[in-house]
Image (cartoon, rainbow, N blue to C red):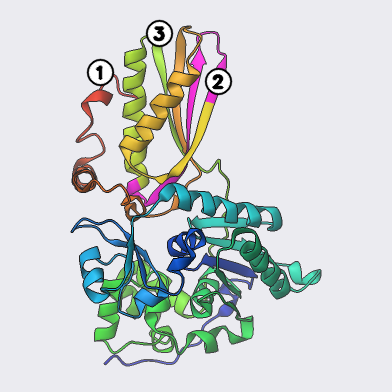
């Protein structure tokens, strides 16, 4: 058992803001229930059907049996034999995610799309005009009315406390935590509730007798740093209700891109396709490395006379090379109609949101998923160019 020392936390490190966190409850399941009311109030598990597939989402009824996201499907089925198993449909979930974002964009001054099913909104200063809680309540009701999807929210002084409050408000609820009540609200909660506390951190802290946020918040900062490094300091700040991270304005233009300017203007279509494949491969690996998903693919070409044209397509959230390559090559085929010499070609992946590869596991090709995992492992160890598709290799690969 660790010895806790008393300390005074300077809450002035970060000024209080008014941050709203919205999270769609069991999003994938809720979408499926919109289309099939027979699923309501029944245990539902969404994921692949191979032995290696994992649970992507599950209903609260399934959770009562111990099922949770990320669990192997085989284990989930053994825990809940009566569960209704559904293969995921990312096209469908992407569509409804955008519907919710459109409602928020129409109302919110500054919002961040943190993932396919959650948003942060900065409404600091709104109380000068009308009640921030009332505004949040009305926005939630509008989402419910226009999309039919249950959504919960937390309203507090920063992103961390708001997110934790949302978790306490679920399912389909609302919770406000005023500045003066932040620590009383956090103190009795499990340290698992703190974003950034993963399984290893949790087990380490529990082995020291730390189970509640109150106990964690009282640990001296140097001890937390020695235990978990910089991550430990950030966890300590969050346990004390301190979080300066801003709400990053969301835009479909939030993107990553690559371009290649040819030394000699060209009409070599096969070579240009190689360039596109090579660029997409590098961009897709970058997405997976930083746990991002894209929903917009854009192709850009610049002719020898400097005329520049672009064409984009919205797709289901993904980070897989083969999906993005097919889309990029399709766009290039539609865009390049003039058969003039080309000076430059580029690829941009936009509409980025946070999301691990799990969201793409509705591609039920187990061998393909395993292949990506092995390829990424090699690239992470030896560099992005350590292994490449033959179809994207060039003598002068674009940087």
- Residues in magenta? 288-310
Q: Are marks 3 and 1 in contact (CB under 8 Å)?
A: no
Total residue callouts: 3
Q: Earlier in the sequence, mark 2 or mark 1?
A: 2
Query: Residue at the spot x=42%, y=77% of the render?
Result: 193
Query: Residue at the spot x=46%, y=70% of the render?
Result: 40
Label 3: how many Cα within 10 Å (few below 14, some 14–19, many 20+): some
Q: Nearer the viewer, residue 126 or 168?
A: 168
Q: Nearer the viewer, residue 218 or 285?
A: 285
Label number found at residue 8: none
Q: Is residue 324 left or right of residue 164?
A: left
What is the secondary structure assignment of the residue under circle 1?
A: loop
Tag nearer the camera, 2 or 1: 2
Q: Is residue 354 visible?
A: yes
Query: Residue at the spot x=44%, y=34% of the render?
Result: 257
The residue to which callout 1 is attached is: 395
Q: Quadrant of the C terminus?
A: top left
Residue 310 at x, y percent in the picture: 54, 24
Task: Please tell me in which quadrant of the rendered image residue 108 appears.
Answer: bottom right
Tag nearer the camera, 3 or 1: 3
> How far separated are the C-alphas under marks 3 and 1?
17 Å
The residue to which callout 2 is attached is: 309
């Amino acid at each position: 058992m660790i010895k806790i020392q008393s300390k005074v936390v300077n809450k002035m490190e970060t000024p209080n803001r008014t941050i709203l966190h919205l999270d769609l409850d069991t999003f994938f399941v809720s979408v499926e229930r919109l289309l099939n009311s027979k699923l309501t109030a029944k245990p539902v598990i969404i994921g692949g059907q191979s032995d290696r597939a994992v649970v992507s989402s599950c209903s609260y009824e399934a959770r009562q049996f111990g099922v949770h996201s990320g669990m192997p499907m085989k284990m989930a089925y053994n825990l809940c034999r009566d569960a209704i198993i559904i293969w995921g449909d990312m096209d469908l979930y992407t569509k409804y995610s955008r519907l919710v974002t459109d409602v928020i964009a129409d109302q919110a001054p500054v919002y961040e799309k943190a993932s396919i099913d959650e948003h942060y909104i900065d409404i600091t200063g709104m109380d000068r005009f009308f009640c921030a809680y009332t505004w949040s309540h009305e926005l939630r009701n509008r989402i419910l009315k226009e999309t039919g999807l249950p959504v919960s929210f937390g309203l507090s002084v920063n992103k961390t406390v708001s997110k934790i409050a949302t978790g306490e408000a679920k399912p389909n609820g609302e919770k406000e935590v005023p500045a003066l009540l932040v620590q009383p609200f956090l103190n009795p909660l499990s340290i698992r509730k703190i974003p950034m506390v993963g399984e290893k951190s949790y087990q380490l802290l529990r082995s020291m007798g730390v189970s509640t946020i109150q106990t964690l918040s009282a640990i001296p900062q140097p001890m937390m740093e020695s235990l978990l490094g910089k991550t430990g300091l950030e966890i300590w700040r969050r346990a004390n209700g301190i979080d300066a991270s801003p709400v990053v304005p969301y835009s479909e233009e939030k993107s990553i891109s690559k371009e290649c300017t040819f030394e000699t203007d060209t009409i070599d279509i096969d070579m240009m396709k190689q360039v596109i494949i090579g660029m997409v491969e590098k961009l897709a690996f970058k997405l997976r490395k930083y746990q991002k998903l894209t929903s917009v693919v854009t192709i850009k070409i610049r002719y020898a006379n400097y005329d520049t044209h672009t064409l984009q397509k919205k797709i289901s959230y993904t980070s897989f090379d083969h999906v993005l390559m097919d889309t990029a090559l399709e766009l290039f085929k539609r865009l390049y109609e003039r058969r003039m010499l080309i000076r430059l070609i580029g690829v941009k992946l936009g509409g980025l949101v946070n999301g691990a590869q799990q969201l793409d596991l509705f591609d039920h090709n187990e061998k393909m998923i395993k292949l990506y995992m092995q390829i990424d492992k090699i690239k992470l160890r030896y560099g992005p160019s350590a292994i490449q598709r033959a179809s994207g290799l060039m003598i002068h690969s674009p940087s």
